[in-house]
Amino acid sequence: MKRFGEKLYQLRIQRGLTLTDLGKMLDVHNTFVSQLEKGRRVPNAEMILKVADIFGLTTDQLMRDELDLPVDSP
């Protein structure tokens, strides 16, 4: 779960989203997204599910540090 923030950042950049864009999609403030990406905040289960749904991933792909993101992620 230590890599969640790194993965979230990669996904956001790959999609061309700003912190504000992703914050609106997740119904949170952009500073919360930034804190998630930097590992300063830990997402709850609901947030992990929202992120997985938005990016079309499994929760395992987001949460398991040993799993990398698929190369063809949107």
Image (cartoon, rainbow, N blue to C red):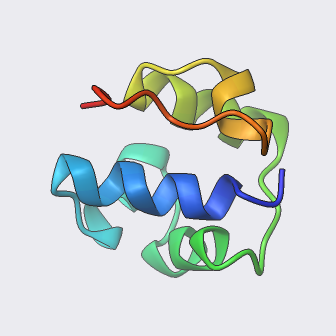
Nearest the camera: 65 or 46? 65
Q: Position of residue 3 (x, y in %)?
A: 71, 57
Does 66 sit left or right of 4 as displayed?
Answer: right
Does 65 sit left or right of 17 as displayed?
Answer: right
Does 59 sit left or right of 31 as displayed?
Answer: right
Q: In this view, does 29 lie above or below 8?
A: below
Nearest the camera: 23 or 66? 66
Nearest the camera: 27 or 22? 22
Q: Residue at x 68, y 42 (%)?
A: 47
Q: In this view, does 53 lie above or below 48?
A: above
Q: Is residue 10 above or below residue 38?
A: above
Q: Which residue is drawn at 66% across and 37% down?
A: 62
Nearest the camera: 27 or 68? 68
Q: Residue at x 48, y 50 (%)?
A: 27
Q: Where is residue 55 in the image (x, y as percent from the top left)?
A: 40, 30
Q: Quadrant of the C terminus?
A: top left
Say how many tags the image has: 0
Q: Position of residue 61 (x, y in %)?
A: 65, 28
